[in-house]
Image (cartoon, helix red, strand yellow):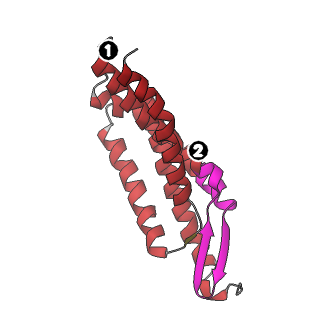
Amino acid sequence: MDITTLALLLMIPLLMWRIYARVKQMLARQQSLIWRHWMSAVFFPLFLAWMALTMADNILAVSCLGAGALAGAWAGHFSLQGTRFEWYGPRVYFTPNMRIALVVFLLFAGRIVYRGVEIYLGNHMSAQELMSQKDFVQSPGTVLPLGLMLGYCAAYSIGMIRWRKAHPADTGPELT
């Protein structure tokens, strides 16, 4: 085993731990800003539709993207039920359900790390030919976690918009 391959194998757990720590930090308590929710509610479905249109010739990829998006939307709805909300005067804060969000984001990050390892090993071992960029992007192993993440983010943002409209910030109890 080459020393660089050994170093890569030692770095992968550290990289995944860093991704985990960063995602966990992103999912901490945060202020609910309606413009952010709207931006996510518009951007993620548009990106999902664009991805589906670019893969229109590959039925399996579009099907996996759609299945991932549906599963992600279900997970987003389920995660919204476990979200904690807090009012501080006119400001609303929320803490997302950490477990569901971590699973969704780490599945996608794991796929990207897997691709990086595949490229590295393909360059150093030349045992097999690498997947082309198009094949990688349209492979079920990539579009399923991508659809899951996009569906989750879109559904969660839409749910947050609906929740904010049903619970205006100035009617919440004052916490001290």
Structural crowding at the residue carrying mark 2, measured as other residues with C-alpha within 10 Å and reported as few (<14), some (14–19) or many (≥20): few
Amino acid residing under circle 1: Met
Within the magenta stretch, is there residue 87? Answer: yes
Residue 81 in the image: x percent, y percent?
A: 69, 60
Quadrant of the frame with the N terminus: top left
Q: Residue at the top extreme?
A: 127
Residue 118 in the image: x percent, y percent?
A: 37, 25
Q: Say if residue 60 shows up in the picture.
A: no
Bounds of the magenta segment = 74-101
Q: Residue at x 66, y 87 (%)?
A: 171
Q: Nearer the viewer, residue 18 or 128?
A: 18
Structural crowding at the residue carrying mark 1, measured as other residues with C-alpha within 10 Å and reported as few (<14), some (14–19) or many (≥20): few
Q: Residue at x 31, y 32 (%)?
A: 57
Lower position in the chain sequence, tag 2 or tag 1: 2
- Count of residue discs: 2
Task: Say which residue label 2 marks.
Answer: 103
Q: Residue at x 42, y 55 (%)?
A: 45
Task: Say which residue label 1 marks.
Answer: 125
| Disc 2 and disc 1 in contact, CB within 8 angstroms | no
